[in-house]
Image: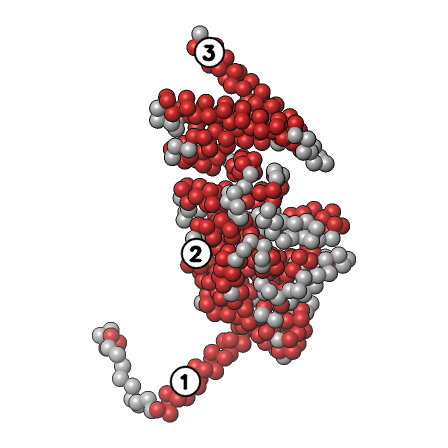
């Protein structure tokens, strides 16, 4: 019977391993690795590379992205396929200007194609470091001129930047903030965006119209438009704005979201009959710098700016304080020169209750009662013109009154509001009586709206007073 104690010791081999044995062992290990790598190809192992790539031509881009998850070996083969001329021709569609072609090449198809392509790149490069993923992506996409900031000769009629933005959104979705910082820095380096922004914010507004347009299109189409969550949009907008002083932030915000001309900026009208295009393609033209100065503007011209301000004021925009956003709104109201007060009031209404109150409260705290009173009158005027409920303006005035520390300050503010109504009505009446009327007779119409605004404003105050009195009785 064999003792158990004997087997507890390590047996000493009779022969030592020679160097030649080690080499043969390494060779066997290499062969094992190669065979293991080949085994991960499954039935594709028997196919020549050319046949494998021919098979890929029968698969959709989504199917190829699913195939890339089978194994690392398959993924590497797909990376090589993407880099081949045939893979480039198959995957990098460039019908960015033929927007009305029937069938596959219509807008919805090409955008969906680049979504799927983004998913393919995301899965194929999953095991690579962020830096290498970006380098590989740039290497493949660098041949597409319409993906570059200055690449397309006809940017207003091109879907290239939209497709690039959709691609990047899918590729980087789920990446952490540090990785997204690297993506932004990488894009800035490729497009030379900071230097171009420096040019437009330091030059006279409108003197570099084409560059302003290209920056607007690049920032909106590539960096901002395609995010689902507001926190993501706030992150990328913050990356664009934060490197600059507040004055330049306001200029840049106006370039990206301000009003644009429609005559040289519209795409083909028939395209807008499609619901999808109404969602994906906005009317783009050259930035109109004088629109806020020359006369009252409509909600459409201010909506983009208001949405951007709300985005930055949101609690998810962690790098912005309320004071930062209010300072930005203040700076924006003098870009390129001081706006008409009516346009200021309309922007505040569109920006929401919280921003509007915070902006007005800051003026109350700083003792700017006269300016605040004029703004209050214009808020009432905009409510009358745009058919908002006038009780909103009255309630906003109530909230602002509570900011004043003494009854004397509050009474002075209320007197300033009444004086502002009187002075504005007299000024408009004088303009009407002077006979200087334009084709639309806007001076008389403004007077009509202002008188109605005053009447409805005071009516709401009377309602509020009567309600409060009835509650105390």
| Residue identified by numbered label 1 | 26
In the rendered image, the vertical position of residue 292 relative to residue 462, given as above or below: below
Q: Which residue: 69% across, 53% down? A: 264
Q: Where is residue 11 in the image (x, y as percent from the top left)?
A: 27, 81
Q: Residue at (53%, 16%) from the top-left corner?
A: 463
Q: Picture quarter containing residue 324?
A: top left
- C-alpha separation, residue under disc 1 versus residue under disc 2: 55 Å
The disc, 1 or 3, on the residue closer to the chain's N-terminal end is 1
For disc 2, the marked residue is 243
Mark 3 crowd level (few <14, some 14–19, many ≥20, 10 Å Cα): few
In primary-sequence order, the first of circles 2 and 3 is 2
Quarter of the image for the C terminus: give it: top left
Q: Mark 3 points at which residue?
A: 469
Q: Can residue 232 be seen in this view?
A: no
Residue neighbourhood size for the residue with mark 1, other residues' Cα within 10 Å, grouped as few (<14), some (14–19), many (≥20): few
The residue nearer to you, when weighing 34 against 232, is 232
Kindly report which numbered mark, 1 or 3, lies closer to the viewer in this rendering.
3
In terms of depth relative to the viewer, which is nearer, 166 or 324? Answer: 324
Left or right placement of residue 379 versus residue 276 in this view: left
Q: How far apart are marks 2 and 3 (CA)?
A: 54 Å
Q: Quadrant of the N terminus?
A: bottom left
Which image quadrant is residue 97 in? bottom right
Q: Is mark 2 on a helix, strand or loop?
A: loop
In terms of image quadrants, where is residue 368?
top left
C-alpha gap between disc 1 and disc 3 = 97 Å
């Amino acid at each position: 019977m064999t003792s158990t104690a004997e087997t507890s010791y390590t047996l000493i081999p009779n022969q030592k391993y020679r160097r030649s044995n080690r080499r043969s062992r390494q060779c066997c290990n290499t062969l094992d690795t190669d065979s293991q790598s080949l085994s991960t190809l499954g039935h594709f192992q028997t196919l020549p590379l050319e046949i494998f790539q021919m098979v890929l031509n029968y698969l959709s881009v989504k199917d190829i992205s699913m195939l890339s998850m089978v194994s690392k070996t398959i993924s590497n083969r797909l990376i090589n396929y993407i880099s081949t001329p045939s893979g480039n021709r198959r995957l990098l569609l460039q019908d960015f200007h033929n927007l009305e072609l029937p069938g596959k090449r219509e807008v919805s198809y090409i955008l969906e194609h680049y979504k799927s392509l983004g998913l393919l790149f995301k899965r194929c490069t999953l095991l690579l470091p962020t830096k290498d993923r970006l380098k590989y992506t740039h290497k493949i996409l660098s041949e597409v001129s319409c993906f570059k900031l200055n690449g397309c000769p006809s940017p207003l009629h091109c879907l290239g930047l939209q497709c690039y933005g959709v691609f990047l959104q899918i590729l980087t979705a789920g990446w952490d903030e540090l990785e997204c910082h690297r993506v932004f820095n990488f894009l800035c380096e490729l497009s030379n965006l900071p230097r171009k922004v420096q040019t437009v914010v330091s030059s006279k507004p409108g003197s570099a119209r084409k560059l302003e347009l290209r920056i607007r299109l690049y920032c909106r189409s590539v960096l901002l438009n395609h995010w689902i969550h507001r926190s993501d949009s706030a992150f990328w907008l913050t990356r664009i704005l934060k490197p600059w002083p507040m004055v330049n932030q306001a200029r840049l915000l106006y370039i990206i979201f301000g009003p644009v001309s429609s005559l040289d900026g519209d795409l083909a009208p028939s395209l807008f009959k499609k619901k999808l295009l109404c969602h994906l393609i906005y009317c783009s033209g050259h930035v109109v710098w004088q629109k806020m100065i020359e006369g009252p503007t409509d909600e459409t011209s201010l909506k983009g700016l208001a949405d951007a301000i709300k985005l930055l004021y949101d609690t998810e925009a962690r790098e912005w304080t309320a004071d930062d956003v209010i300072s930005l709104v203040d700076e924006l109201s003098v870009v390129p020169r001081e706006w008409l007060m009516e346009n200021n009031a309309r922007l505040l209404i569109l920006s929401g209750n919280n921003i509007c109150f915070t902006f007005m409260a800051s003026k109350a705290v700083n003792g700017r009662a006269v300016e605040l009173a004029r703004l209050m009158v214009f808020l009432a005027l905009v409510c009358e013109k745009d058919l908002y409920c006038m009780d909103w303006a009255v309630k906003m005035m109530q909230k602002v009154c509570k900011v004043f520390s003494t009854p004397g300050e509050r009474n002075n503010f209320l007197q300033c509001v009444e004086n502002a109504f009187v002075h504005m009505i007299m000024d408009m009446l004088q303009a009407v009586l002077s006979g200087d009327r334009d084709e639309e007779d806007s001076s008389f119409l403004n007077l009509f709206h202002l008188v109605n605004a005053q009447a409805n404003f005071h009516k709401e105050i009377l309602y509020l007073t009567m309600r409060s009195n009835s509650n105390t009785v």
